[in-house]
Amino acid sequence: MRQLPRFAVRFALALAVMAALSAGCAGEKRSNATRASGELPDQEVSDFVLTETDAGHPQWTLYARNAATFTARDVIIARGVRMDFFDEKGVRSSSLTAREGEILQQKRDMTARGDVVLLTAQGWRMSTDELHYLNGQNLIVSDKLVRVERGGDVLEGLGFQSDPELRHFEFKQQVRATVRTKAGTILEPRGEKK
C-alpha cells in the first residue's frame, strides 16, 4: 500500500479545516439577526408564506423575506413582511407592510413593527410605527401615533382600533383632522394654522 507524502496530507487537512470554517461562517451570517437575544431558532426559512383560512376561504396570507421559528416561545420572527387580507369573496381587500413581524404560532396574532403601512382597496392609507393584529377578533389595534389618509383628508391620533379594511375605525385620544372641501380648501380645528 502506497503512503501519501506528508505535504499532501497536510494540504488535505488544511483544505478540510478551511471548508469547515467557511461553512460555519456562512451559517453564522444568516442567523445573526435572530441571535440578538442569544437564542437560536429551531428553523429558519427564506420566502416564508403563511395563510389563514376559514372553511377553505382565505382570511389572510403573510409573506416574509425570511422567518425564524422559536417553538419554545411559540413565536415566528419575520423580516420584510407583507400581509394581504381578503374579503368574504376571497378578493384582496387590504395589504399591510412592515419591516418586521412577530407571529404567535397558536393564536396567529401578529405584532408588526417599523414603517407599518396598511393600504385598502377603497383607497385608505394607514401608517404607524407599530400595530397588533388580533386574529380571533379580526382587529388591528395600536397605542402608538396612527395616521389615516384618503383623498387629501388626514386623521391622526393615539389609541387606534379598526378592521383590516378600515371600514370601521376609531381613535381613542389626541385626535387631529385635516379635511379638504370639494373646492380644495383645507379645514382644520380652530386655533391650528398651517
Image (spheres, rainbow, N blue to C red):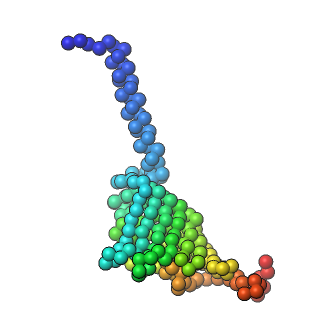
Nearer-the-camera pick, 39 or 15: 15
Percent x, y of residue 132: 48, 72
Q: Which residue sits furthest left?
A: 1
**Which residue occupies 56% across, 68% down?**
116
Percent x, y of residue 128: 58, 71
Q: Do we see residue 144 in this rendering? A: no
Say above or below: 191 vs 91.
below
Percent x, y of residue 77: 44, 60
Image quadrant holding the C terminus, namely bottom right
Residue 130 in which image quadrant = bottom right
Image quadrant holding the N terminus, namely top left
Nearer-the-camera pick, 190 or 60: 60
**Which residue occupies 77% across, 84% down?**
185
**Which residue occupies 63% across, 77% down?**
149
Nearer-the-camera pick, 137 or 183: 183
Residue 24 in which image quadrant = top left
Is 38 left, or right, of 3 in this rendering?
A: right
Q: How many marks?
A: 0
**Which residue occupies 35% across, 76% down?**
57
Is 170 left, or right, of 183 in this rendering?
A: left
Say above or below: 6 vs 39.
above
Q: Do we see residue 177 in this rendering? A: yes
Percent x, y of residue 166: 53, 81
